[in-house]
Image (spheres, rainbow, N blue to C red):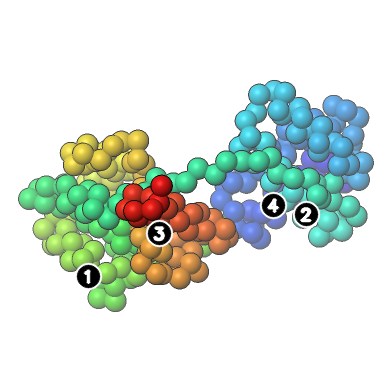
Amino acid sequence: MNLDNLLDQFLTHILTERGLSKNSVEAYNNDLKHFLNFVEERGIHSINDIKRTHILLFQKHLKEKGYNVSSRYRYLVSLRRFFKYLLREEIITEDPTRNIELPSKDKKLPKVLSEEEVEKLLNAPDINTPFGLRDKAMLELLYATGLRVSELVNLKLNQVFLEQGYLFVMGKGSKERIIPFGEVAEKWLRRYMKEGRGELLKGNTRSPFLFIGSRGKPITRQGFWKNIKKYALQCGIPLEIISPHTLRHSFATHLLEHGADLRSVQTMLGHADISTTQIYTHITRERLKREYKKYHPRAE
């Protein structure tokens, strides 16, 4: 089987059996095609002829071409997964990526708001208007559940169970998860649905979407992000610490600071790997250090 056929076989596997999104599969395709073209240009046409030295040469090639650490890291992760699959399928007998260290990558901690800043942001919308009432409900639900903004704007009425206090979403890799929310978010959702949503629908009463934008259509991710920036400016929160996922990061960090179990937070966020969730424990430790230095008389 030639290299292109093996690549197609692997891509089919991660799409159909592993449930990765089409965007993720396309990213793997681009990375692996780049590598396979690289080795073919050097006379390698059989998967069993690819050795550790070819992986190292490719990493060197990427560095010389100006690829940054994050990109080289991603390429090696793609290669590792590809060769691990081939080894498991007994197509190869040795994994050439084995014992090759990932390029050192500085982990940037997500920006997180303090609880006081969250309170200001959540209280910024003008709840006397249908749009403000919608934004208030969206912000409250976002902070209550840690949803991704893309999940929030695509929520449908049949995904939210107000009486039971939970919702369900299909996250990355088509994985369904159930997330609880509290009484405050429930209160604002009920008020928005009673007083605001009908006005925003513009007669389009058959829309299945919970949060409505202009002309009765669902609000877009870009539209909601624009509103978050507006409210941040309104209440004096620096824009450099605001992102579409700021409330998601704040949700996770505040839960952990108040004693939540890491596995529970992982489940609510929809992380496949707990190491992704552990980044929030680093944030809580950093905040604790800052507080200690700021207030302890013998910290300096």
Q: What residue type is labelled 4?
A: Thr
Q: Name the residue beneath numbered marker 2.
A: 84
Q: Nearer the viewer, mark 3 or mark 1?
A: 3
Q: Is residue 99 left or right of residue 262?
A: right
The crowding category of the residue bearing disc 2, from other C-alpha atoms within 10 Å (few below 14, some 14 to 19, many at least 20), is some
Residue 12 numbered tag? 4
Tally the marks.
4
Marked residue nearer the N-terminal end (3 or 4)? 4
* Residues at discs 3 and 4 in contact (Cβ within 8 Å): no
Q: In this view, does 147 lie to the left or right of 124?
A: right
Marked residue nearer the N-terminal end (2 or 3)? 2
* Residues at discs 3 and 1 in contact (Cβ within 8 Å): no
Q: Nearer the viewer, mark 3 or mark 4?
A: 3
Residue at the location (75% across, 33% down)?
59
Q: How far apart are marks 4 and 1 (CA)?
A: 44 Å
Q: What element carries label 4?
A: helix
Marked residue nearer the N-terminal end (4 or 1)? 4
Q: What residue type is labelled 1?
A: Glu
Residue placed farthest to the left in the image?
128
Q: Which of 107 and 152 is in front in this view?
A: 107
Q: Nearer the viewer, residue 212 or 168?
A: 168
Q: Where is residue 261 in the image (x, y as percent from the top left)?
A: 45, 70
Q: What residue type is labelled 3?
A: Ala
Q: Name the residue beneath numbered marker 3.
A: 252
Q: Nearer the viewer, mark 4 or mark 2?
A: 2
Q: Which amino acid does label 2 sit on?
A: Lys
Q: Position of residue 215 (x, y in %)?
A: 21, 42
Marked residue nearer the N-terminal end (1 or 2)? 2
Q: Name the residue beneath numbered marker 1.
A: 183
